[in-house]
Amino acid sequence: MKKVFKGLSVALATAALGVATTAYADNTDVEFNIEPTYTVTIPPKVTLEKTRSGAYSKTEPIIAEDVFLRENQKLVVSVGSKSAFRMRTQNPASTYRLPYTVYGQNGPIKNKRLGGVVATFVTSPRKQRVPITYTTDEAPKYAGSYSDTVVFTITPFELP
């Protein structure tokens, strides 16, 4: 029985040795995803002030903070207005519309109907400011409370 036991021990040791010496090749994929993030602050209301020329104007900044974009991207802020940048009074019977221009980082908005780019921001943890100026194109012809709604579009954009 000793001889059988020794043979069994040798067989177990060989089997264990075979398992220990078997090598497996495999891959490990390591990955994670970070979506672009940013905080953009746009003034909810801008009240224009009378200038020496009789026109009205005001400059307020758009502020971007903690901008974290993909490589070769910038954050683009565009503006548009259904009125094509013409303010009107609250009187529904009025026909006069006071034209105004929005000036951004690249100068005046050229395409008033569809809007245009007023600010661009790059990846940065720092606070970035772009002054935006709203100026009437003429002195108002009539008294009244004039207003218009400017819609801002914020989009990450691939650099060329």
Image (cartoon, rainbow, N blue to C red):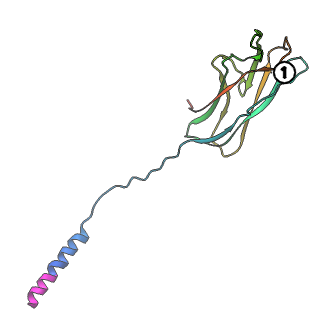
137 or 147: nearer the viewer: 147
Residue, x 72% and y 18% (percent of image)? 85
**Callout 1 environment at 10 Å: few (<14), some (14 to 19), or many (20+)?**
some
Q: Measured from the top left, where is residue 51 in percent x and y?
A: 88, 21
What's the magenta region? Answer: 1-9
| Residue at figure coordinates x 62%, y 34% from the top left | 75
> In this view of the protein, which residue sits in the foreground, 99 or 16?
99
* Residue 149, image quadrant: top right
**At x 85% / y 12%, what residue is drawn?**
142
How many numbered dots are placed on residues in this image? Answer: 1
Residue at the top extreme, as displayed: 95
The amino acid type, in three-letter code, at marker 1 is Tyr
87 sits to left or right of 11: right
Q: State the residue lying farthest toward the bottom.
A: 2
Question: Residue 100: horizontal and vertical position, in percent?
Answer: 76, 18
Q: Position of residue 118 (x, y in %)?
A: 69, 27
Q: Is residue 36 left or right of residue 9?
A: right
Please give the residue where the numbered disc 1 appears in the rendered image: 56
Q: Would you place residue 143 above or below residue 78 in this image?
A: above
Quarter of the rendering occupied by the N terminus: bottom left
For the point 83% across and 23% down, which residue is it? 57
